[in-house]
Image (cartoon, coloured by chain):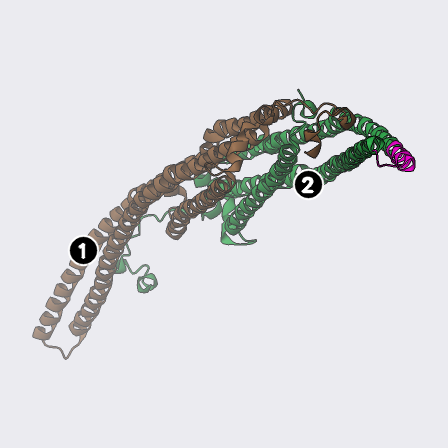
Chain colours: A brown, B green
Amino acid sequence: MDWGTDLWDQYDVIDKHTQSGLELVEKYVKFVKERTEIEQNYAKQLRNLTKKYHPKRGSREELECRFSNHQAFLDILNEMNDYAGQRELIAENMMMNICIELTKYLQELKMERKTHLSEAKKAQQSLESTYKQLDSSKKRFEREWREAEKSAQYAEKTDQDINATKADVEKAKQQAHMRAHIADECKNDYAAQLQKYNKEQSQFYFSDMPLIFNKLQDMDERRVKKLAQGYVLFSDTEKQVTPIIGKCLEGITKAGANVNERNDSIALIEQHKSGFERPGDLDFEDYSQGINRASSDS
Amino acid sequence: MDWGTDLWDQYDVIDKHTQSGLELVEKYVKFVKERTEIEQNYAKQLRNLTKKYHPKRGSREELECRFSNHQAFLDILNEMNDYAGQRELIAENMMMNICIELTKYLQELKMERKTHLSEAKKAQQSLESTYKQLDSSKKRFEREWREAEKSAQYAEKTDQDINATKADVEKAKQQAHMRAHIADECKNDYAAQLQKYNKEQSQFYFSDMPLIFNKLQDMDERRVKKLAQGYVLFSDTEKQVTPIIGKCLEGITKAGANVNERNDSIALIEQHKSGFERPGDLDFEDYSQGINRASSDS
């Protein structure tokens, strides 16, 4: 089964089908392009989010990163930033490996399709032109044959007319002979044209058009194959970064696990303890013994 | 090492540190909330994208889904829609398990912190008030002792004054005796107040405040632990849907693999072949034999 054999009389169907196939590729490219825009936008929002929450240099927040629960938040922000980078990579690779690649391929296919269809048109026009020649040759033979028949009838009628002169009869016979000769030549010409046409028609239906339709089928199958590769790339591009995204998520889990509440309490002690002893009991200041009189004013 | 012992004189530090800890939780909740908004927005854009490219009911595109390369695109759109659903799930679970949960917990911690700090303030005020009593008692003792000394000196002076009457001497001695008695009472009162203050001060520095500071430390450690759990949930929420997202990607790969260019070519044949034979050779129409005359006009 192939288009050349089974769709020999479906030029319009093949024309439309191959056109619709190219449109699907175009649509898919547009779809992936819009996906990359969504992905870029998503990545940008994630980047802005991490930037917004990232402590400024020399800020109180930065100083607090000596505490593990503050440091972990910073680690998470950094992982989210890497995560955003991976989403950008998805967008870039989709654009490069699907959109640009398929757009280039699409241009080639459009050219190729145009070539095949114009070849088909040319073959059709050539066959039509041959048919017109055949038709006019056939009509001339028919016309000339009628003329010859009329001339023959006239010659016979003249021959049996008692009033006709010998010269009239001779002239009519000569005329009839000439007409018969012309009709015969037209018959030969028609026969030759018919042979030519039949040969060309057979070439057209059994060789030229099947070849062109099969080329279009082959082209369409190549398009489908390439498009299917583009479909697979749509998920492969994301699968490629999945392990790295997994590492970002692991990094976040690790940041959470690294938080140590006991160490954070001790860090506060180490940073702020004065080392002073707690106040002991106040002494009794016995004015009646005359000691510490001065200090009683304090 | 604990705050009660090592940071006994760092009330302000503990006040600020626990406040800053709660602020970090608040900041983290806000960060996650903004992440969920980004995620929701991302999911919505993906959903809109799939909807935009999904063929309308009864459209030419829908009919074309009999071709595997068109059907696969539809499959990809459906997988992308499921994918978007998983991103929505991430957003919903983050909101539920991190934002709402931590916000509730934060309210409890704020209440608890307020309670501890107001207990500390109350203990401080009580000790200050006892100190003021002690101070005033000590000053009264000092004042009264001076008065008693002056009275004693006056009594002695009067006793040695040759111009003084016996009555004067007696009166001065009585006065000195009375003053000495008052001073003695004040001394006892001061001693009692001092004992009370020292007991209270010891209770304050070695028992009450360490207890409160340790409660604040315990509270802060609970906060850090809960926050760390919230950090881990941030990646766990996404890890949970990773297998399903993986399945969506697998579905896309499968859709691409299901495309069969040969079958698509045959499907076009089955849909459109007319079943007609290709035209054979045209017959020679021999007018000179008087056959097919009518057909020559066609």
Describe the element under mark 1 as helix, strand or loop. Answer: helix
Give percent across and percent down for residue A235. 48, 34
Residue type, mark 2 in image: Thr
Please report contact status of discs 2 and 1: CB closer than 8 Å, yes or no: no
- The reply to whether residue B245 is in sight is yes
Give percent across and percent down for residue A209. 31, 45
The magenta stretch spans residue B167: yes
The quarter in which the N terminus of chain A is drawn is top left
Query: In this picture, is A287 found above or below A31?
Result: above
Q: Which region is colored magenta?
A: B162-178
Residue B47 vs residue B182: left or right? left
* Disc ID at residue B103: 2
Q: Which residue in the protein does label 1 denote?
A: A189
Residue B132 vs residue A120: left or right? right
Query: In this picture, is B51 found above or below A283?
Result: below
Badge 1 sits on which subunit? A
Mark 2 → mark 1, Cα distance in angstroms: 101 Å
